[in-house]
Image: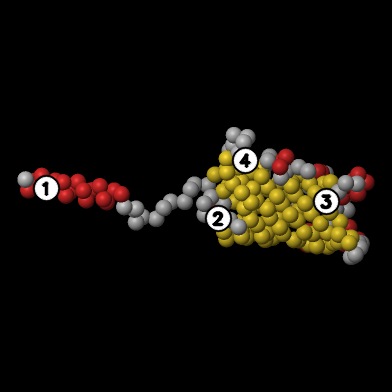
Amino acid sequence: MKLLVASTLVAGLAGLSAALPSSAPSTPAAGETFAIDNAHSTVIFRTKHLGISEAYGRFNSITEDSQLVLDAEPSKSSLRLVVAAESVDTGLADRDKHLRNADFFNAKEHPEIVFESKKISGKADALEVSGELTFLGVTKSVTAKARQVGKGDTAFGDHRAGFVADFTFSMADFGVAFVKQSPGAVGPEVSVTVSLECIRK
């Protein structure tokens, strides 16, 4: 009888310990790789014109070299964003042609504008993304304020995540010729908004 009671007690304690939560820290989800959905992503910019108004434009092509690695711990996440300079679009063909030439983007010699993150911190609704922006062959550090818009399975049968980020840089820092030639005509500061819809690979 004593043996039966002891066995029952041991079994009960074993079951209780199995039901209790582990005191060991939980392991964050491993980084997941996402491709950028160009059709549902946007890179918009604005800058001053003659110091009295704002001119707007966008880039229509985010290349396949772009990639997001998303981890439960933001510091383990990373972003590489590559934009085709030739895809600049301001709604006016002659102006776009001017922007593509050596006065501004020099798209033939520098076909890509690249951002590579170096540090991501904060929470999903208030992220800080620091990295390097390469434009016209010049690389400078920039910091963006970002937030996650949403994340989950979709009706397309895939898993997606969406983010919006804003940052500002000076064209003078990257040696844009027109800014040197015609000071006050445009900029020099440019504000950029990046809206990304990313598909898990």
Q: In this view, does 50 lie to the left or right of 17?
A: right
Residue to which mark 1 is pinned: 5
Instruction: Looking at the picture, tell me which residue is in the foreground, 156 or 89.
Output: 156
Pair 1/4: label in front: 1
Badge 3 amino acid: Gly
Q: Is residue 72 visible?
A: yes
Residue to which mark 3 is pinned: 57
Instruction: Looking at the picture, tell me which residue is in the foreground, 9 or 109.
Output: 9
Q: Are marks 4 and 3 in contact (CB under 8 Å)?
A: no
Of label 2 and label 1, which has the lower sequence position? 1
Pair 2/1: label in front: 1
Label 2 crowd (10 A; few <14 / some 14-19 / many >=20): some
Residue at 47 percent of width and 51 percent of height? 28
Label 4 crowd (10 A; few <14 / some 14-19 / many >=20): many
Residue to which mark 4 is pinned: 199
Q: Give the residue at the far top of this rendering.
A: 157
* Up/down of 191 relative to 62, above or below: below
Residue at 48 percent of width and 48 percent of height? 29
**In 3D space, how far apart are the residues under numbered discs 2 and 1 (Cα atoms)?**
52 Å
Badge 2 amino acid: Pro
**In 3D space, how far apart are the residues under numbered discs 1 and 3 (Cα atoms)?**
79 Å
Badge 4 amino acid: Ile
Disc number for residue 74: 2
Of label 1 and label 4, which has the lower sequence position? 1
Mark 1 lies on a secondary structure that is helix
Residue 152, picture quadrant: top right
* Up/down of 37 relative to 117, above or below: above
